[in-house]
Amino acid sequence: PKEQLEALLLPENKRSLASTLNAHVVSGKAIKSERFVVAKGLYLKMANNSVLAIDAKNAAKGIKFGDATIAKADIEASNGVIHIVDTVYVPKRVRTVLYTKTKAAQAKAAAGPALEKAKEATGKAIEKAKEVGGRAVEATKDAAGKAVDKAKEATGAKPAAPAATPAPANK
């Protein structure tokens, strides 16, 4: 699928891309398709160290390799034999990694706007609390000052005079 291809081509997925490509390579002896048909299938160790079943039980419909079918077989090359498949075989482990990374990226992208809104709302709430808190402090000071004045009026008290400094002693 297009999403898997795009994900495999990202720099952070180099290992997954290498594993996928190596899932298409058998190290060692060249194996011609007639051997698959005679054996009705084989298990092959791939270059990515996975073991892949080659299913040739119904060779008339095609030789299966994972989800792929061999479209053209037995192309001689200088270093082996090439079998062209009709689709890219992506190992299950790689599919799982790509799926997890894709879902994490989607969740992060979806959470981004909500997180920004939450930060904005929190900032507004803090500013409002400061504004209200500042008014509350001023109101408290005003109320305390008025209460002190009323108490003075009720008792007839005058503001306290500064303490007298004793006169210097005569010598």
Image (spheres, helix red, strand yellow):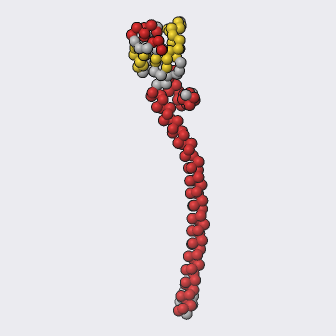
In this view, the residue in front, 126 or 67, is 67
Q: Nearer the viewer, residue 124 or 113?
A: 113
Taking 45 as reference, is 135 left or right?
right
* Residue 112 picture location, percent across and down: 57, 46
Horizontal and vertical percent position of residue 122: 56, 57
Q: Position of residue 123 (x, y in %)?
A: 59, 57
Vertical side of 170 occupied by 35: above or below: above
The residue at 51%/38% (across/down) is 103
- Nearer to me, 86 or 120: 86
Q: Which image quarter is the N terminus in?
A: top right
Q: How many labels sit on residues? A: 0
Q: Residue at x 58, y 75 (%)?
A: 139
In this rendered view, identify the residue nearer to me: 131 or 67.
67
Asked whether residue 118 appears in the rendered view, the answer is yes
On screen, 62 above or below 9?
above
64 lies above or below 165: above
Q: Residue furthest bottom?
A: 156
Rendering coords of residue 65 (x, y %): 46, 18
> Is residue 44 at all visible to an observer of this figure?
no
- Residue at (57, 80) in percent of width and height: 143
Q: Residue at x 50, y 27 (%)?
A: 16
